[in-house]
Image: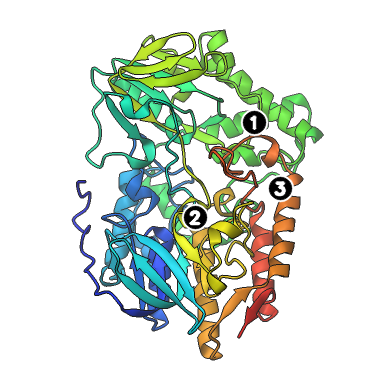
Amino acid sequence: MANVSGTEGKAKTQPNQEVYDVVVVGAGFAGLYMLHRLRAQGLKARVYEAGNGVGGTWYWNRYPGARCDIPSMEYSYQFSAELQQEWVWTERYATQPELLRYANHVADRFDLWPDIQLNTRVVSSHFQDRDNMWQVTLQGGGRVRSRYVVMATGCLSVPNVPHIEGLADFQGAVYHTGQWPHEGVDFSGQKVGVIGTGSSAIQSIPLIAQQAKSLTVFQRTPNYSIPAHNQPLTAEEVADVKSRYAQFRAENWARGFGADFRDNDTSALALSDEERTAEYEDRWAKGGLAFLAAFNDLVFDDNANATAREFISNKITGLVDDPDLAAKLTPDTPVGCKRLCVDTDYYATYNQAHVLLIDLREEPLQKIVNQGVATESATYEFDSLVLATGFDAMTGAVSKIDIRGVQGRKLADKWAEGPRAYLGLATAGFPNLFLVTGPGSPSVLSNMLPSIEHHVEWISDCIEHMTKNQLSLIDAQSAAEDAWVDHVNETADASIYPRCNSWYLGANIEGKKRVFMPYLGVPPYVAKCKEVVADGYSGFALS
């Protein structure tokens, strides 16, 4: 696997059997900032990263068109004013290579490399009741011990490879968007099949179509997508934000999704058809996820949401020449109950003669054969297959590690009926184990970078509190955890989010319990986290 930065591989190997104050799993944006905070507190910390470089999501996801869907100047760290001022983003929505360069710059600037161990996968973490320490086992058999463990493993970091009969028999090349070759892929002259129409497919399909001789997309369920209208950032735009960065961040953090979505406090149903359409047109013209905040009841009221559905459906009809094809590309679910996508020319790509859409609801996929894909109606031959089948979201990376808490209880057993965590930060029975943007926190329903910073700062402040007060254990209390999980579910049930099968509920993973995992609402969540601390870490047992 080729390196993408001269800084990859800088981190040095550490001998086994070391003892740390904190072990951090993952060197994405969460792991990097966690390490920076812990070192500032004088703690001995170690980050273990399975990949050959830092960057997490942006290290692994290198598919064509991969870029953030939150504007770059918001999808970035704010903990260092100097870093914010010196780094210059080039586009409204940064590409994967630019985001990866940024992650490496942060590791360089704050000299994080000596405490990061690359190419090292954590396979287990077992709590030792006899001395209240975690024993962490690394792939290959190495072991270290640590007082605390922080899971900075990311919400979208475990690719979902579908169980399709015959997949191993396909004689061409197979790529998953979440495990893209670092050297890139040239599809020139090839017949390419893409399975899936989620975010990674919607970003990559227009670019694959530019290269491929033919492109066939297999769609199970269509997704709503809003144009990105991506463009280079002007010097004036950058200077304007940088002149008021602190205020800009504070204003965004007070909004429902923790981002500059220009939240509108008006109901979609309070306006005339003309006024409502004008607002939607303005949002569509500006582009991006801010469309979802066009009115204050789009994610809570079915009738309000129906007005957004009608608007986007009409847009799809206008963008796709073939009315039957447009109908197949139009979802029949509420806008937003699946992750709203952001695209560049996605719908228009289907107007090209060499691009074909197969609706799997009409023509079910049967199996993969040596030369391609067999449906109930036909066999389609390909040189390459792209699996744009998403991730085992929110819990996948944590669940892949053998984590055992008090008296050897397995986290996998505790979460068998769905993940349970207090504030998305900790789970009862697993003391001194912290989760960054875990289930039960806003995480994927927020701007991830500020949410990561919020959790990292809460965790590091908590560890500092423990140290100053000579406390050795902190564990979420079951009653507080149960109450919080109930609250997360009640909040979700009042919205449109549980109304369709999405990865928010784990519905894309065979056998995974269907539970809505993120928490809806950044400001009330932040207030709750502050309240818990002010009340002496209420809901936690400290000893």
- Residue 18 visible in image: yes
Quadrant into which the C terminus falls: bottom right
Q: How is the image coloured?
A: rainbow
Q: To which residue does mark 1 refer?
A: 280
Q: To which residue does mark 2 refer?
A: 399
Please identify, in this view, whether the residue under mark 3 or under mark 1 is nearer the observer: 3
Of the residues under marks 3 and 1, which one precedes in the sequence? 1
Q: Amino acid at mark 3?
A: Ala
Q: To which residue does mark 3 refer?
A: 492
Residue 276 is situated, as x and y percent measured from the top left of the image, at 72, 30
User: Which is nearer the eye, 384 or 35?
Assistant: 384
Q: Secondary structure at mark 3?
A: helix
- Residue 80 visible in image: no
Q: Amino acid at mark 2?
A: Ser
Answer with the quarter of the image where residue 104 lies. bottom left
Q: Amino acid at mark 1?
A: Tyr
Q: Secondary structure at mark 1?
A: helix
Residue 387 is situated, as x and y percent measured from the top left of the image, at 39, 31
Q: Residue at x 29, y 19 (%)?
A: 212
